[in-house]
Amino acid sequence: MRIAIKPFVYAAIMMTAGGAVAAPLQAPVIGGLSTLETGDWELRSREPGGKIRHICLADARQLLQLRHPGRNCSRFVVTDTAAQVVVTYDCAAAGSGRTALRIETPRLVQIQSQGIADSAPFDFAMEGRRIGACR
């Protein structure tokens, strides 16, 4: 009988086989997001007459998947600096996207995102601004 082992499981097995203890698999840390403050954020569309929405930002990674909130998607970090974070992500059948955050201050970001959600393309630009504590 032959058992298929996924590469990340194989790596974890190999790390523990030599006596070392493997750390649990976690989402990669995106250092550029670490400067952003948590709290109530206002997201304002850059389009004329665009909508304003609010999110309680507990984790700055929420800004990376605004069209796929709460989904467990795989991410690939393209750029990770103090001034800019760019990621691509894949949410399987739910869609995929590419998001670029330009970090102006710990309370102000410019967001550009595009991809596929609900079987339709999306493309938007927003300004995110921290306006206070979550309500």
Image: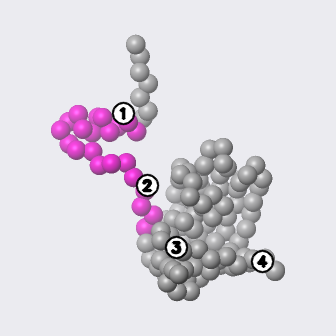
**Percent x, y of residue 65:** 60, 61
Of residues 33 and 133, the one nearer the viewer is 133
Q: Which of the 4 quarters of the picture holds residue 127? A: bottom right
Q: Residue at x 73, y 68 (%)?
A: 124
- Which residue does the numbered mark 2 point to in the structure image? 27
Contact between marks 3 and 1 (CB within 8 A): the answer is no
Identity, as a three-letter code, of the amino acid under mark 2: Ala
Earlier in the chain: of badge 1 and badge 2, it is 1
Earlier in the chain: of badge 3 and badge 4, it is 4
Identity, as a three-letter code, of the amino acid under mark 3: Leu
Q: Does residue 76 appear in this view? A: yes
What distance separates the C-alpha of mark 2 from that of mark 4?
Answer: 33 Å
Q: Is residue 59 above or below residue 13?
A: below
Identity, as a three-letter code, of the amino acid under mark 4: Gly
What distance separates the C-alpha of mark 1 from that of mark 4?
Answer: 48 Å
Q: Which of the 4 quarters of the picture holds residue 123? A: bottom right
- Which residue does the numbered mark 4 point to in the structure image? 50
- Which residue does the numbered mark 1 point to in the structure image? 10
Q: Which of the 4 quarters of the picture holds residue 28? A: bottom left
Earlier in the chain: of badge 1 and badge 4, it is 1
Residue 14 magenta: yes
Q: Which mark is residue 82?
A: none
**Percent x, y of residue 7:** 42, 35
Q: Residue furthest front?
A: 135
What stretch of residues is rendered in magenta? 8-33
Identify the secondary structure beneath mark 4. Answer: loop
Q: Residue at x 62, y 80 (%)?
A: 42
What distance separates the C-alpha of mark 3 from that of mark 4?
Answer: 21 Å
